[in-house]
Image (cartoon, rainbow, N blue to C red):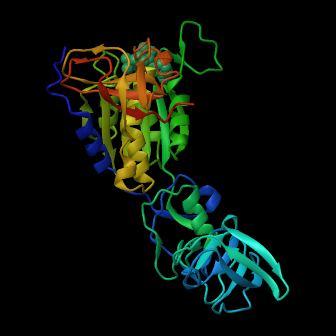
Amino acid sequence: MSTGSDLLPVEDARARALALASPLPVEWVRLDEALGRALGADVLAQRTLPPWDNSAMDGYAVRSADLTGPLPVRLAVGETIHAGETPKLELRPGICARIMTGAPLPAGADAVVMQERTRPLQLAEGPAVEILEAVSPGNFVRPRGEDARAGEPLLGRGTPLGIPELGLITAQGMLTVPVPRRPRVAILSTGDELCRADEAPEGRIVDTNAPALALAVARAGGLPTLLGIARDTQAEVSSRLADAQGFDVVLTSAGVSVGERDFVKAALQEQGVEMNFWRVAIKPGKPLAVGRRGATLYFGLPGNPTSSLVTFELFVRPVLRRLLGHSPSAVEPARVPGRLEGELRKPPGLAHYIRVAATWRDGELWARPLATQTSGALRSAASATHLLHFPREASSLAHGGYVVLLPVSWAA
Ligand code: AMP
Ligand code: MG
């Protein structure tokens, strides 16, 4: 058995896979098509938003200089301004305006006093108010241009488009955004033992990798195409790969190890795929072949169902995110600190990615390794929330020790 010293470290393997990929050409899509994608170009603001200083509270717009004397201070109320209305008066000393959240500040006002800190009065001369506390300039004022300034950058290229980002873009009146197009991803299962889910198994096993990978691809923002099942001959795998034209990424599963019927590497090479690496110091997922032909990236993923999901998470998903134009920090798998519940042992040489269920307790994330860790069993991935990184050279992790956890994208 390999000691692991001739195997590529996980981080190097990911860096090499990422180096093969660059963002795909930009397309303009409607905003409801853009969630979770990244901007393919800088977007400049065309509008200054909010367009005027406005109130963050229901209360009174005041000149803060009027409130420097002993409290309470009595002020005349010159007008009432609701959201959607335009102020008519300029505040002179001793005068304030009743104002509602979102309404523009009248000229002369520099602060808002929330209504809970006031006492309205009805005087013979007209409406007035007692202000119970002094405020500094800017108090409860949402300044003009807080969200955007016309002509200035609004969001930069590579920014992931979450809901607030799409809101900022909506407020600019933009109906479409430039984003790298979605990667087209072909998925080929290989194995004499496999059948489709709608076939009677009769001594075979149902291909679960292809549908699982298709879901993972779609969740990562790609467009999956299932290419079916190839039998374990180099000729068949090779001809299926030859037919897979026009894809940005081709994923195969199984047949990539050193077994007698493992033809994927040879078939990839026969098809002119330049192999970049195929041995990674990782468990599960040591046999993993990565290469490129022209603009298409090829991943020969391992066949064990959990191995294919783990290697998807650690290598394929980051590459899909790079193709989708995410900035470098958003391409690497996310990591969070946690503590180990239980103990773990292994020989040094391979980094292990342990399926754990993590729960929040006493202000920390506690990670409990799932009972089954065999990569052949899908059950060892079911109910996993994170992968626990058991470093390559480590041989034991103690109960309560601090560990690095990677949230999995395949969780419910
Ligand atoms: P291999 O890498 O071809 O030796 O396959 C490793 C293990 O994964 C074997 O037990 C296969 O039966 C299983 N396997 C391979 N492909 C699939 C698949 N598409 N769905 C489910 N299990 C698979
Ligand atoms: Mg096989």
Q: Is residue 115 above or below residue 265?
A: below
Residue ranking furthest to the left: 5
Position of 55 compared to 259: left or right?
right
User: Which of 29 and 384 lies nearest the eye of the viewer?
Assistant: 384
**Which image quarter is the N terminus in?**
top left
183 up-or-down from 179: above or below:
above
Residue 106 percent location from the top left of the image: 66, 86
Q: Position of residue 67 (x, y in %)?
A: 58, 80
Comparing 374 with 248, the one in front is 374
Residue 312 x/y as whole percent: 41, 34
Residue 390 in view, yes or no: yes
Q: Position of residue 19 (x, y in %)?
A: 28, 50
Question: Of all residues shown, which one is farthest toward the top?
Answer: 203
Question: Residue visible at 48% across and 14% down?
Answer: 193
Residue at x 62% of width, y 20% of height: 197
Query: Which quadrant does ligand 1 occupy?
Result: top left
Quarter of the rendering containing residue 206: top right
In this image, 335 relative to 131: left or right?
A: left
Q: Indicate the quadrant where residue 225 lies.
A: top right
